[in-house]
Image (cartoon, rainbow, N blue to C red):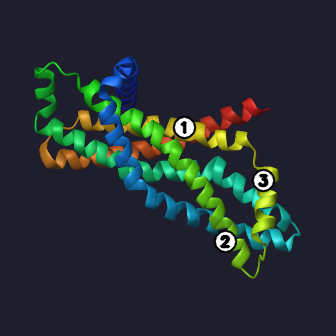
Amino acid sequence: MIFRDLGQLLILFWRTLQALPLLWRHRRKVAEQFFEIGNASLLMVCILSLFIGGVLALETGPVMVERGLSNFLGGIVGLAVCRQLAPALMAVLIAGRIGSAMAAEIGSMAVYQEIDALRTMNINPTHYLVLPRLVAISIALPMLLIFADLVGWLGGAMVCATNQQIAIGFNSFFTNLREVVEVQDIVHGLIKSFAFAIAIGTVSCHQGLKTIGGPRGIGRSVTKAVVNSIIMILVLDYFLTHLLVQLEK
């Protein structure tokens, strides 16, 4: 069962890659999907990333201060946010918000035979439905990640500056962050987010296309899309982290 689903996912992804030369023809649908992903997720990304940075500073700050390492707090928060926490948690957020919407929309079309109608009109569902969504989410998630990094750093700096146990000013926080965080650390997170986006888009569209059984089937597909996407994110996170760390040596 698992290997069959993985095979179907790889086949769907390969067919979508083969359809990339047709991307310009579907540019309007890509723009619509991109706007929907960004517009629907920006506020949630802002709130989540702000509190990610704040919680990280709140947990690590007092411990660092007790050990006389408070000057390194900006770098620790900066690295943790851009390399690990922001990519993984933003991907989980997008899987829950956008992946579920993709699976529900395509699943509804499958249940009500709209996809069969597309095939009857000689329109390839992979080209018409999957390609625009996969391209849009692959562009949108890395862009949202950059915004999440900035807001997460700001959240950490705000907690450090306002918490009496930490009491590290904005200048000290961002000075250490600039000294520690390099461009490759940000690129590290962007590579992860790009891979996560492909996984979310492929899994969600695949679950939508294979939906059967009416409204109950749509609900099952949405649930499977979100759960399988989160599992893929966590598995990919480990292997990508291992690979990127090895490449940096």
**Label 1 CA crowd tier, 10 Å (few <14, some 14–19, many 20+):** some
x, y percentage for residue 59?
Answer: 69, 69
Q: Is residue 221 visible?
A: no
Q: Please name the amino acid that badge 2 sits on.
A: Met
What's the CA distance linking mark 2 and mark 1?
32 Å
What's the CA distance linking mark 1 and mark 3?
28 Å
Q: Secondary structure at mark 2?
A: helix
Q: Circle 3 sits on which residue?
A: 178
User: Total marks drawn?
Assistant: 3
Q: Please name the amino acid that badge 3 sits on.
A: Arg
Q: Quadrant of residue 63?
A: bottom right
Q: Secondary structure at mark 1?
A: helix
Q: Which mark is residue 236?
A: 1
Q: Are marks 2 and 1 in contact (CB under 8 Å)?
A: no
Q: Is residue 49 left or right of residue 209?
A: right
Residue 46 drawn above or below residue 66 = above
Q: Quadrant of the N terminus?
A: top left
Residue 190 drawn above or below residue 152 = above
Q: Please name the amino acid that badge 1 sits on.
A: Leu
Q: Quadrant of the C terminus?
A: top right
x, y percentage for residue 26?
Answer: 30, 28
**Mark closest to the chain's N terminus, 1 or 3:** 3
Q: Which mark is residue 158?
A: 2
**Mark closest to the chain's N terminus, 2 or 3:** 2
Q: Is residue 91 left or right of residue 27?
A: right
